[in-house]
């Protein structure tokens, strides 16, 4: 699917608490990358726990330790997990900037633009509230794309449910985590799903 539209966008700012020390993740072009969990409070008091990937030079400029408040600027990334363990689609926040944020309010905001790559699924919760599941494809600069699961509620869900594959959209929202239980070979296992909660949406030609 060719999505070189010229308006693809992927910008995120998350401010929260480092939940554990960074540990090695992978190496790319000779640069070591590390991963750490960032906990961001919602207004409701619920806590989203997001995995952040950061290059070693970035961490050397802003050393992190558990309990530290930090702001991360970057992009939401996805990759297919082919190990057979855990989720098939892994969502992380790729850090492009880090800075200490002691005493500042937590923040979780995203701006994304891309195209729908699957038909939207409009459904109702058991309490009757409308909800729409979306899969947004957002181009990176060098030909790859990130496939990001999004969720919209209420009147916004109705609007999103009327869209089709290939429709372009720009959204504002937040990256959230959601625990769930999956039964594998008769054994219940705790999993975490990551999705973008859509707060606003506009169509892009």
Image: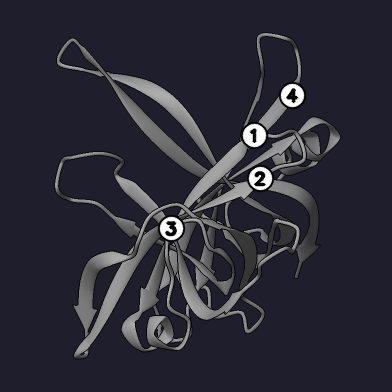
Q: CA distance from mark 2 to mark 1?
A: 6 Å
Q: Where residue 25 sits in the image (x, y, percent)?
A: 24, 66
Q: Which residue does the image show at 77% across and 40% down from the upper left?
A: 43
Q: Which residue does the image show at 19% across and 90% down from the upper left?
A: 30
Give the vertical position of 46 relative to 95 (above or below).
above
Q: CA distance from mark 4 to mark 2?
A: 25 Å
Give the vertical position of 98 relative to 69 (above or below).
below
Q: Residues within 10 Å of mark 3 (few under 14, many from 20)?
A: some
The disc, 2 or 1, on the residue closer to the chain's N-terminal end is 2
Q: Where residue 74 sits in the image (x, y, percent)?
A: 55, 74
Q: Which mark is residue 46?
A: 1
Q: How many marks?
A: 4
Q: Which residue is mark 2?
A: 41
Disc 4 secondary structure class: strand
Q: Which residue is mark 3?
A: 66
Q: CA distance from mark 4 to mark 3?
A: 39 Å
Q: Are marks 2 and 1 in contact (CB under 8 Å)?
A: yes
Quadrant of the snapshot with the N terminus: bottom left
Q: Where residue 66 sits in the image (x, y, percent)?
A: 43, 58
Q: Which residue is mark 4?
A: 130
Q: Are marks 4 and 3 in contact (CB under 8 Å)?
A: no
Q: CA distance from mark 3 to mark 2?
A: 16 Å
């Amino acid at each position: 699917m060719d999505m070189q539209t010229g308006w693809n966008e992927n910008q995120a700012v998350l401010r929260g608490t480092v939940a554990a020390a960074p540990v090695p993740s992978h190496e790319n072009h000779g640069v070591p990358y590390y991963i750490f969990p960032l906990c961001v409070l919602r207004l409701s008091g619920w806590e989203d726990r997001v995995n952040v990937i950061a290059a070693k030079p970035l961490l050397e400029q802003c050393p992190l330790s558990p309990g530290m408040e930090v702001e991360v600027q970057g992009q939401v990334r996805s990759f297919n997990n082919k190990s057979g363990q855990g989720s098939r689609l892994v969502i992380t926040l790729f850090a492009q900037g880090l800075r200490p944020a002691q005493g500042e309010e937590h923040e979780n905001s995203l701006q994304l633009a891309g195209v729908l790559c699957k038909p939207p699924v409009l459904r109702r919760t058991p309490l009757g509230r409308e909800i729409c599941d979306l899969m947004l494809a957002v181009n990176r600069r060098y030909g790859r794309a990130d496939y990001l699961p999004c969720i919209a509620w209420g009147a916004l869900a109705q609007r999103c449910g009327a869209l089709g594959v290939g429709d372009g959209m720009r959204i504002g929202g937040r990256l959230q985590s959601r625990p769930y239980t999956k039964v594998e070979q008769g054994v219940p296992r705790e999993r975490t799903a990551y999705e973008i909660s859509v707060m606003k949406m506009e169509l892009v030609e």
